[in-house]
Amino acid sequence: MTELIETERLYVEELQSIMEGYFAELDNSELSHLIPPTLENKRDVLFGNLPAIYEFHNRTFLRELENCAEKPELVGTCFLKRKEELQVYEKYCQNKPRSEVIWRQCGDSLFFQECQKKLDHKLSLDAYLLKPVQRITKYQLMLKEMLKCNKGEGTAELEEALTTMLDIIKSVNDSMHQIAITGFEGNLSELGKLLMQGSFNVWTDHKRGHSKVKDLARFKPMQRHLFLYDKMMLFCKKREETTDGHDKTPSYSFKHSLKVRYTLCVRQSDTEGLQQLRLMQNNANNKGRERQ
């Protein structure tokens, strides 16, 4: 509990330094001549919704965690109570690739060097902009440690809080993959909730009449990244491109879609450790019929 509160205080201090030492300084007339042209009207892209994250942690979450110092059994309830507010990280992570592009374009400018000097930071701004991503993934690790030490009152709430944080992380991860889809002409928001995404080997039944083993061997699987929504499944080809010598950025080129009339069932193979995707026909007349 002590580690959770102390690291939360440090996190809030770091967010405050970003807001006051960088974000607010963009309005400082004395530094306006140092602001690079590529940053003009791009502050919201560079920082995303960091102001909202800072306000939530500074005014609400930190205080509530501090109130649990003497009653650690209440910390699980604290996370559950703020489940909706913690969803703010999804928007931040979705924007992160765009933020990184802006930073690569102007991160070495005199403006950022001056701000870093004033703050006496050893690390540049991009390292601090990564803090929210690191923080949202850290919570579940600390909750796991607390569960190991707590077997009494509040255990059920801690377990539920851990499940909630894992769900949030999954949602954040899924959303970051989703924004990298290219070539799909429809509206992704109309497809319903993104239930799952991942890479699978896909076989297509586009040729018939080959029954011999040597003929069947010709049908090699295609590696496809699948996005399963409530109403449709998208088949995409994963591509990775290196930008300006930096890490490869994945994108997903849309190839095919399949309207969903089935319930998803993903099973783990015992022999090969591979995921197997099966669709269960979901209607009253064919309940339980399986399609592979």
Image (tube, rainbow, N blue to C red):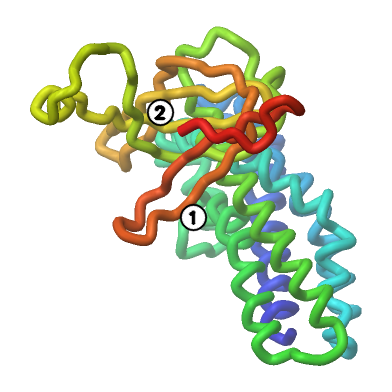
What is the x, y in percent for residue 88? 74, 45
Residue 29 occupies which quadrant of the picture? top right
Categorize mark 1 by other alpha carbons within 10 Å: few (<14), some (14-19), many (20+): few
What is the x, y in percent for residue 34? 52, 34
Q: Observer-nearest residue: 41 or 197?
A: 197
What residue appears at the point 62 percent right and 45 percent down from the top-left corner? 172
Q: Observer-nearest residue: 75 or 232?
A: 232
What residue appears at the point 26 percent right and 12 percent down from the top-left corner? 208
Q: Residue 251 carries which label?
A: 2
Q: Observer-nearest residue: 205 or 145?
A: 205
What is the x, y in percent for residue 23? 67, 43
Q: Observer-nearest residue: 224 or 178?
A: 224
Residue 175 occupies which quadrant of the picture? top right
Sequence-earlier tag: 1 or 2: 1
Camera sees residue 206? yes
What is the x, y in percent for residue 228? 57, 31
Residue type at mark 2 is Ser
Residue type at mark 1 is Ala
Q: Mark 1 highlights which residue?
A: 127
Q: What element carries label 2?
A: strand
Residue 196 occupies which quadrant of the picture? top right
Quadrant for the N terminus, please: bottom right
Q: Is mark 1 on a helix, strand or loop?
A: helix
What residue appears at the point 63 percent right and 20 percent down from the top-left corner? 188
Going by the image, does 88 lie left or right of 45? right
For marks 1 and 2, give the CA distance: 24 Å
Q: Is residue 46 above or below residue 76?
A: above
Residue at the extreme left: 214
Camera sees residue 30? no
